[in-house]
């Protein structure tokens, strides 16, 4: 046998292998799917068996388009661009030999029909891509570091809120216990005070002489006030009306205001003094003297309590005078009232203790209300959505703005968004923070802004992308009074441990044409 015949099978096998490894439009890792079996080939969806020569014959035989990876015959197929020196890519097969140099195929392998010559620009694209990739990696690194800090600060703040909540709850329990003790103390003292008052009613003794002194004080004050009224009346009548002395006018005005209620008050005081105080005291004194003669003396500690009810009438009259007279005259009344009240207070130790207990009770009650308000605020803060790991918390009230020519747009995160005119400075409320729009926490809605004329309430839909700082990148108004903010912030940057890489899905850019 000749040497040629001996090597013929090897030559045929090599030709078949070369043909199989050079199927146009198929990636190297899929070339094995296009090997012939006895001169035939099966569609990748196993729907048909075709002659091997039917591959890339510019006629679509397989329903899945797998027989035409290198032509545009099957619109549902993909063409592989090797792009040596850059990133391999896929384009839709209908873009093959369409007379357009596809950017995804930087090596120009998609155009071989001669309609157009596409240069190989993979090196230039690789250089540009390397720069973009480096910039992107820096943004992700800076943003990731900033996000870590936001998470740390957010968790620290939440921890402090939880600690504060626990302290407030404990303090409220303690204060409520104190409030209960004071209430029990008040109940006991009120019972004692009731017993003391009942005992004092049984005690009959002439009221002390200082009641008469206080009555004389009231009459003396009335006389002095009448003298001052006369002086002011003469001043009003005889002053020079052509001379505008502001001090004189002020005095006359005050005098007129004073007169409006003084006469009526004076009559009321005189009536109370005569009918309630004097007559009441005289009648009671007579009754007490008669009963005292028939009963034994009560304990000495009950004597101060007897005059409490009688003296209170006089104190009331003094207070009525003090409330209506000018401030400069009150010095004549206040000492008497103050001294009288002090005497009244010191006369009854139980009353003093009861007042102190009530004052303490009110103080504790106010403290509880203050603590409950603080606790409510802390609970509201803890309920708010600041992201899965509270990464948005420290961005609360962080503001950003963007000058778009006619208007400057701004937003304070979790606050309000505004539109300000660059002509007259007029500012319009575009909405207040409403909620996040998805679980990724990269979209926010600001709603219930100022209502448009013949339109809806203004609102802002803000979308966020990764960035080292919180900024507004672009503002648009796709619908009337519905604004779109494109923003960047570190709160949405991915952390290295969160990035899921899926190598099973190749990068498949597409070339779309209408």
Image: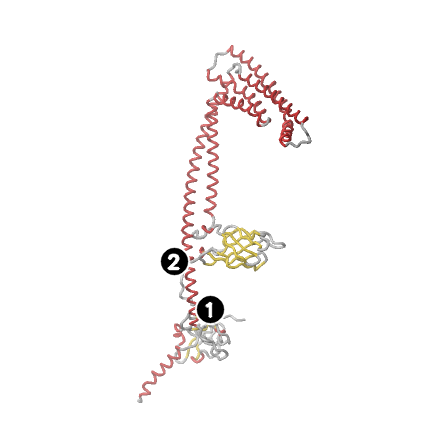
Q: CA distance from mark 1 to mark 2?
A: 27 Å
Query: In front here: 127 or 45?
Result: 127
The percent position of residue 144, horizontal first and vertical second, equals: 41, 57
State which quarter of the image contains the C terminus: bottom right
Residue farthest to the bottom, as pictured? 2
Q: Which residue is mark 1?
A: 509
Compared with 390, 324 (above or below) is above
The percent position of residue 270, horizontal first and vertical second, equals: 62, 20
Q: Which residue is mark 2?
A: 497
The percent position of residue 195, horizontal first and vertical second, equals: 48, 21
Numbered disc 2: secondary structure: helix
The percent position of residue 111, horizontal first and vertical second, equals: 47, 77
State which quarter of the image contains the N terminus: bottom left
Res 395 seen here: yes
Q: How is the image coloured?
A: secondary structure
Q: Is residue 219 left or right of residue 360?
A: right
Between discs 1 and 2, the one toward the N terminus: 2
Query: In front here: 198 or 445?
Result: 445
Numbered disc 1: secondary structure: loop
Query: In front here: 20 or 162?
Result: 162
- Mark 1 vs 2: CB contact within 8 A: no
What residue do we see at 40% from left, 73% from top? 84
Res 439 seen here: no
Q: Residues within 10 Å of mark 2 (few under 14, many from 20)?
A: few
What residue do we see at 53% from left, 12% from top? 291
Compared with 431, 325 (above or below) is above
């Amino acid at each position: 046998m000749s040497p040629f015949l001996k090597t013929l099978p090897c030559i045929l096998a090599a030709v078949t292998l070369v043909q199989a490894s050079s199927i146009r439009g198929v990636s190297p890792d899929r070339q094995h799917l296009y090997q012939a079996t006895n001169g035939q080939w099966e569609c990748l969806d196993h729907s048909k068996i075709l002659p091997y020569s039917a591959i890339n014959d510019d006629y679509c035989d397989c329903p899945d388009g797998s027989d035409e990876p290198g032509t545009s015959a099957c619109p549902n197929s993909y063409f592989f661009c090797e792009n040596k020196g850059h990133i391999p890519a896929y384009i839709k097969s209908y873009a093959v030999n369409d007379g357009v140099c596809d950017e995804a195929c930087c090596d120009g392998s998609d155009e071989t029909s001669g309609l157009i010559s596409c240069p190989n620009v993979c090196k230039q694209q690789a250089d540009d891509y390397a720069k973009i990739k480096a910039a992107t990696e820096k943004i992700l690194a800076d943003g990731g570091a900033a996000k870590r800090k936001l998470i740390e600060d957010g968790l620290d703040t939440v921890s402090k809120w939880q600690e504060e909540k626990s302290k407030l709850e404990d303090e409220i329990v303690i204060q409520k216990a104190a409030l209960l003790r004071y209430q029990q103390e008040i109940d006991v003292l009120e019972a004692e005070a009731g017993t003391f008052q009942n005992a004092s009613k049984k005690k009959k003794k002439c009221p002390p002489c200082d009641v008469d002194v206080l009555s004389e004080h009231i009459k003396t004050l009335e006389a002095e006030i009448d003298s001052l009224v006369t002086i002011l009346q003469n001043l009003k009548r005889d002053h020079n009306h052509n001379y505008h002395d502001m001090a004189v006018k002020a005095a006359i005005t005050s005098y007129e205001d004073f007169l409006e209620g003084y006469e009526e008050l004076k009559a009321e005081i005189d009536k109370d003094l005569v009918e309630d105080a004097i007559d009441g005291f005289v009648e009671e004194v007579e009754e007490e003297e008669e009963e005292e003669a028939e009963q034994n003396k009560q304990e000495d500690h009950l004597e101060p309590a007897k005059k409490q009810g009688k003296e209170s009438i006089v104190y009331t009259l003094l207070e009525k005078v003090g409330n209506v007279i000018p401030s400069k005259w009150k010095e004549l009344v206040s000492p008497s009232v103050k001294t009288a009240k002090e005497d009244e207070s010191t006369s009854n130790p139980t009353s003093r203790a009861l007042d102190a207990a009530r004052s303490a009770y009110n103080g504790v009650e106010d403290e509880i209300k203050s603590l409950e308000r603080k606790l409510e605020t802390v609970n509201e803060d803890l309920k708010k959505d600041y992201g899965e790991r509270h990464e948005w918390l420290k961005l609360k009230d962080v503001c950003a703005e963007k000058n778009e020519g006619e208007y400057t747009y701004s937003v304070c995160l979790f606050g309000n968004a505004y539109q300000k005119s660059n002509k007259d400075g007029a500012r319009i409320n575009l909405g207040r923070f409403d909620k996040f729009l998805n679980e990724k926490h990269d979209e926010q809605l600001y709603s219930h802004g100022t209502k448009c004329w013949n339109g809806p309430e203004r609102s802002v839909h803000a979308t966020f992308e990764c960035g080292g700082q919180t900024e507004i990148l672009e503002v648009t108004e796709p619908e009337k009074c519905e604004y779109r903010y494109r923003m960047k912030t570190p709160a949405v940057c991915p952390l290295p441990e969160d990035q899921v890489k899926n190598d099973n899905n190749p990068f498949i850019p597409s070339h779309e044409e209408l």
